[in-house]
Image (cartoon, rainbow, N blue to C red):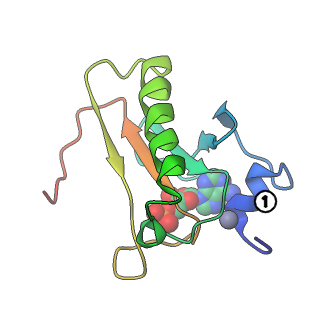
Amino acid sequence: MENCLFCKIIAGEIPSTKVYEDEYVFAFRDINPQAPVHILVVPKVHLDSADQITEENAVHVAKCFEAIARIAKAEGLTNGYRVINNCGADGGQTVMHLHFHIIGGVKLSEKIV
Ligand code: AMP
Ligand code: ZN
């Protein structure tokens, strides 16, 4: 997708600190980390948000979660972590390419649910 920041990062057109990549998934460190470990996990296909997940494309989401478990182990997050998806404007999403935040490396306090 043209003019999508995360599509450009996946394509290597914009630099990132890559932590994981496979056929389906690209993961890199958030530029503005909110915890000692803050990684963004994105599907390589462009989906605007979680609101676009369907039966047909759900494999890309499943692959993200497989990657999340693998990355968490590699990052040493043995005591847990949080996975966050901000969906749409009211959900606080600022980059409109579906992504999951892995937040960890510290005991997390703030919780909505
Ligand atoms: P969200 O607000 O859920 O859409 O998350 C977007 C995230 O992308 C924010 O946490 C930003 O800090 C992060 N971000 C924006 N630009 C970059 C970039 N060039 N490299 C890495 N992370 C970025
Ligand atoms: Zn994109």
Count of numbered labels shown in the rendering: 1
**Secondary element type, mark 1:** helix
Vertically, is 51 above or below 41? below
Task: Tell me the residue at 67%/33% (across/down).
Answer: 22
Give the crowd class for mark 1: few <14, some 14-19, many >=20 residues within 10 Å.
Answer: some
* Residue 68 shows up from this direction: yes
Apparent side of residue 111 relative to residue 104 in the rendered image (left or right): left
Q: Residue furthest right?
A: 13
Q: Position of residue 98 (x, y in %)?
A: 53, 62
The amino acid pointed to by label 1 is Lys
Q: Nearer the viewer, residue 67 or 56?
A: 56
Q: Identify the residue at horizontal 84%, vertical 48% (top origin).
A: 12
Where, quadrant-wise, is the N terminus in this rendering?
bottom right
Residue in view at x 36 percent, y 23 percent: 77
Where is residue 67? Give x, y as percent: 51, 33
Q: CB at mark 1 closer than 8 A to ligand 2?
A: yes
Q: Is residue 41 above or below residue 106?
A: below
Residue at 53 percent across and 58 percent down: it is 57
Q: Nearer the viewer, residue 40 or 48?
A: 48
Q: Quadrant of ligand 1?
A: bottom right
> Disc 1 designates what residue?
8
Question: On the picture, is 38 further left or further right than 20?
Answer: left
Quarter of the rendering occupied by the C terminus: bottom left
